[in-house]
Image (cartoon, rainbow, N blue to C red):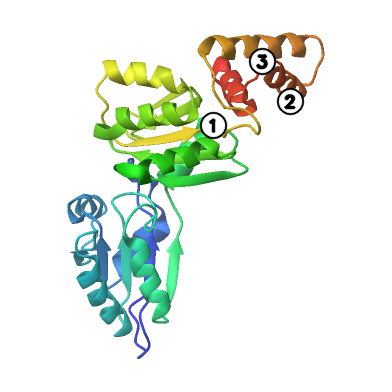
Amino acid sequence: MASTTTGPGTLYLCATPIGNLEDITLRVLRVLQEVHLIAAEDTRRTKKLLNHYNITTPLVSYHEHNRKSRGEELIRRLRGGEDIALVSDAGMPGIADPGTELVQDAVACGIPLVALPGPTALITALVVSGLPTDSFVFAGFPPRKGRERAAFFNTLAAEGRTAVLYEAPHRLLETLADLEKAAGDRWLVVARELTKQYEEIRRGPISQHLEHFRKHTPRGEFCLVLAGAPAGEEGNLTPGRLEEGVELVQELVALGVAKKEAIRIAARERDLSKNALYAALLDRKE
């Protein structure tokens, strides 16, 4: 891969495992071995990955606190003909990390970019949630405080599409409380430690998650998948109302009504979100 021309090198955006080291692709392994340099958000975590696969390529840090100075250095090296692989802590670089800025600088300088697809926590959480995936929004990490944080949750509460966000364990309870305040007791899927030994997927109204994590200290990395707000409805629900909706769907299906139509009717009759009702039916099967 090392270039023998006088043109710029290539910036490779390499997706790395979000937990299980076996989830890395053969292509990423090859590129990590062949580039001149690997720029990593956390060199300690990346070093463990490289050691696991016996990769000895030089490694430098590129993170939130050095992205300006290190970014300028990386652009100089790319313009000088070196190939560089960019990796984040886990998943696809540029998703909820400082990689986006380096990509933008590379584009501005005419440096070739190649994205190597692979694991990403938001897609993994979304597809396992049981909520609609045909249209969704990724919200990243919530702002820490102030009006910006309140506006963030109010916007999510009004969003009609499935929404995915990230949160750290020490802020999970505050975020769940703020979500409930803004969106009501809406259906939420909490995915913890995805692909790792202690992976956990919890489904239910927000209040159930608050009750659980008040009793069990949140640990690990969290993805939250929120059901979209139905048009013209507040999106509130309680376990009792949700159970009534599930029972009505089952009664209608037993009478010969198609499942999709039964969900539509039950959601209208019980004033529930179709997304939440569909997810509850999936959860009942499990």
Mark in front: 2 vs 1: 1
Q: Residue furthest front?
A: 147
Mark 2: amino acid: Lys
- First in residue order: circle 2 vs circle 3: 2
Image position of 204 (left or right of 276): left
Query: For mark 1, what is the residue?
Result: 227
Q: Amino acid at mark 1?
A: Ala
Q: x, y (%) of residue 193? A: 33, 34
Q: Quadrant of the N terminus?
A: bottom left
Specify the quadrant of the image occupied by residue 19: top left
From the viewer's perspective, is the residue at label 1 or at label 3 nearer?
A: 3
Of the residues under marks 1 and 3, which one precedes in the sequence?
1
For label 2, the residue is 260
Q: Which mark is residue 271?
A: none
- Residue furthest to the left in view is 44
Please tell me which residue is depicted at 42% across the width and 48% down the height of the picture.
119
Q: Is residue 86 above or below residue 50?
A: below
Judged left or right of residue 34, residue 260 is: right
User: At 61% across and 28% down in the image, what residue appears?
Assistant: 275
Where is residue 214 shown, x and y percent of the image? 28, 18
Residue annotated with mark 3: 270
Classify residue 151 as left or right of residue 271. Answer: left
The residue lying toward the viewer, choosing from 251 and 148, is 148
Q: Nearer the viewer, residue 182 or 105?
A: 182
Residue 92, visible in the rendered structure: yes
